[in-house]
Image (tube, grey):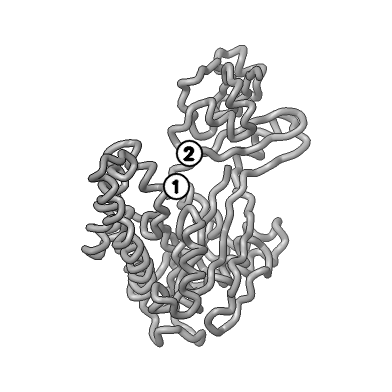
Amino acid sequence: MGFRCGIVGLPNVGKSTLFNALTETAAAQAANYPFCTIEPNVGQVAVPDHRLNEIAKIGGSAKIIETQLGFVDIAGLVRGASKGEGLGNQFLGNIRECDAIIHVLRCFEGEVTHVEGKVDPIADAETVETELMLSDLESLEKRVPAFAKKAAQGDKEAKAAASVLGQALDLLREGKPARLTQPKDDDEARVFAQAQLLTAKPVLYVCNVDEGSAADGNALSARVFEKAKAEGAQAVVVSAEIEAEIVTLDPADRADFLSDLGLSETGLARVIRAGYELLGLLTFFTVGPKEARAWTIDKGSKAPQAAGAIHSDFERGFIRAETMAYKDYVALGGEAAAREAGKLRSEGKEYVVQDGDIMLFRFNV
C-alpha cells in the first residue's frame, strides 16, 4: 500500500520543479508561465528508510524493496477555478482522486512571474482553499436536501448522509474546511469518506524557499507554520531549487552537499515523514534471503490487515504472525537470536501492528 499526494498551488510557485526533484525525472515541464502542466504527471517514489538497509544486511537479503509514495503534479489553480476558470474543473477532478493535498506555497522573492503580482503565501493558500470550499459548497447544497428528503422517508443510508454532510455544509458556509467534520459513528464516517470532498483531504503545506533559507526558513515560511499550527495541519520547508540540484549529484556526494548547506536530510525525506504523519501511516517489514521489503499500512491496523497488504490470500487465510520489533532484530543480530532471546512473538488476529515490526505471516487457504 502506498498513498497518493496531489501537489497543488497557484501557477509558478515551484510545483513542477519540486515534482521533478522528488521523482528524479524531468517528466513535468517547469516553465515560467501558467498552465505549463496540462495533464497531471504521476510519479512513484521509493520511500527512503535506513532501517530497511540494516534489516537487509543482517538478513543477508539479495534485494531491497522500498515502499512507494505517489506524487501527482497538478496544473496550477487560479481564482475562479470553482466556476471553470483556467483549468478549473480538470484541476478539481484531479485533486479528488488524491488521498492528501501537498499545498506548495511560494516563500521567496525573485524574477519568476507570480500570477497574483505579489509574493504572499497566506493569500495564495486562501485563494486555493476558497476555490476548494466553493466547489464543495456547491456540491453539498445540491446533495444535502436530496438526502434529507430520503431520510424523512426512512432511508437509513440517507439519514447518515444528511447528518454528516449537513454538518460539513454548515462548516463550509462558515468558511471552514470539511475536514473539521466529526462523524458520530462508523456509518457516518463511511458516507463522509465516500463523498470525496476536496476540503476533507488532509493538507501538508510545503514552503518553497530560496537556497539561503533552506535550513531555517524565513519570515514568509514562518507565517505559513503559524497558519498550519492554528489549523492542526503540517508544514515543512523545502527549497525546490536545491532539491533539483541534489538529484543531479552522485548519491555519494549528496550528504556533503547537504551538510555544506546546513541540512541533514533532503526535502523529500521531510515531505515523506510529514506525509506519513498526516495520513496516519506506519511501516512494517518482511525479510528473508531473497529480499527485505518495507510495507505501508494505516496506524491501528491489525495483523490480518497487514498480511492483506502483501496478498489478499494472506489475510483471508491468516493464522498468526511471527513478529519482532526492529530494535530487537538489530540489537540481537537476526531472527534466530531474537527467537532464542524470547523476542520473537506469535501474534493473533487482534494484534495491532507497530511501526518497525518485522513480520512473517502464517496462513492457510
Q: Residues within 10 Å of mark 1 (few under 14, many from 20)?
A: some
In the rendered view, would you say 72 is above or below 279? below
For marks 2 and 1, give the CA distance: 8 Å
Q: Label 2 is placed on what type of residue?
A: Asp
- Left or right: where does residue 118 sit relative to residue 307? left
> Callout 2: helix, strand or loop?
strand
User: Mark 1 — residue?
Assistant: 279
Of residues 266 and 118, which is closer to you in this image? 118
Q: Residue at x 68, y 60 (%)?
A: 253
Residue 103 in the image, given as x and y percentages of width and height: 44, 65
Mark 2 and 1 residues: CB-CB less than 8 Å, in contact? Answer: yes
Residue 213 in the image, given as x and y percentages of width and height: 46, 70
Of residues 259 and 201, which is closer to you in this image? 201
Of residues 180 and 48, which is closer to you in this image? 180
Q: Residue at x 54, y 38 (%)?
A: 283
> Callout 1: helix, strand or loop?
helix
Q: Residue at x 46, y 52 (%)?
A: 274
Residue 166, can we see it?
A: yes
In the rendered view, would you say 259 is above or below 219? above
In the rendered view, would you say 312 is above or below 255? above
User: Mark 2 — residue?
Assistant: 298
Residue 189 in the image, given as x and y percentages of width and height: 35, 42
Q: Residue at x 58, y 51 (%)?
A: 69
**Which quadrant of the rendered structure holds the C terminus?**
top right
In the rendered view, would you say 113 is above or below 256? below
Please identify the quarter of the rendering in which residue 184 is found: top left
Residue 224 in the image, given as x and y percentages of width and height: 35, 66
**Which quadrant of the rendered structure holds the N terminus?**
top right
Q: Residues within 10 Å of mark 2 (few under 14, many from 20)?
A: some
